[in-house]
Image (spheres, helix red, strand yellow):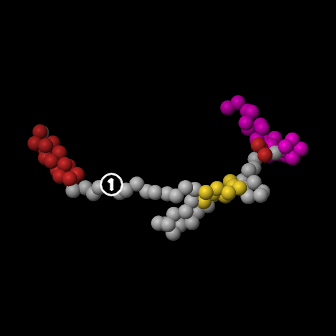
Amino acid sequence: MRAPACFAVAVASTALIGAAAPPDAAYFQQATAQRLANGVIVTAQLSQDSPIAGAQVFVPAGLAQQTSATAGIAAVTAATVLRSPV
């Protein structure tokens, strides 16, 4: 019983000796954000290593942006959900 365990440890340690070193940590440039005149925030993060383009757009919306004069059925529904005990 002891010999197979020693053999397994020897094989595992031999495999680890030949294992490749971990890759260097990835570097990403700082993300930039710009607020447009209508309040929308557009963020972007460039990468010279990747040909992929992506963007995130944050739109100020929802119950927090409504006044009592502009509140509608969505505001009533949100208030009901937020104030209902679970």
Q: Residue placed farthest to the left in the image?
A: 3
Identify which amino acid the numbered label 1 is placed on.
Pro
Q: Find residue 1 and report its horizontal and vertical position in percent.
A: 12, 39
Q: Quadrant of residue 22?
A: bottom left
Q: Find residue 29 and report its horizontal and vertical position in percent.
A: 52, 58
Identify the residue at image location x=17%, y=45%: 9
Question: In screen coordinates, is 82 left or right of 46?
Answer: right
The image shows residue 18, relative to residue 81, as above or below, that is: below
The image shows residue 50, relative to residue 58, as above or below, that is: below
Q: Residue placed farthest to the bottom in the image?
A: 51
Q: Look at the image and say whether residue 72 sits in the magenta stretch.
A: yes
Question: In screen coordinates, is 70 left or right of 65?
Answer: right
Q: Which region shows up in magenta?
A: 67-86
Identify the residue at image location x=51%, y=69%: 51
Q: Quadrant of residue 45?
A: bottom right
Identify the residue at image location x=51%, y=63%: 47
Q: Quadrant of residue 76?
A: top right
The image shows residue 43, relative to residue 52, as above or below, that is: above
Q: How many marks?
A: 1
Identify the residue at image location x=73%, y=38%: 81
Q: Residue placed farthest to the top in the image?
A: 85
Residue 8 visible in the picture: no
Residue indicated by mark 1: 22
Q: Look at the image and say whether residue 47 sits in the magenta stretch.
A: no
Callout 1: helix, strand or loop? loop
Please state which of residues 76 and 33 is positioned toward the viewer in this rendering: 33
Quadrant that contains the C terminus: top right
Please state which of residues 25 and 55 is positioned toward the viewer in this rendering: 25
Question: In screen coordinates, is 43 left or right of 47?
Answer: right
Question: In screen coordinates, is 51 left or right of 23?
Answer: right
Please state which of residues 35 and 52 is positioned toward the viewer in this rendering: 35
Q: Find residue 66 and report its horizontal and vertical position in percent.
A: 81, 45
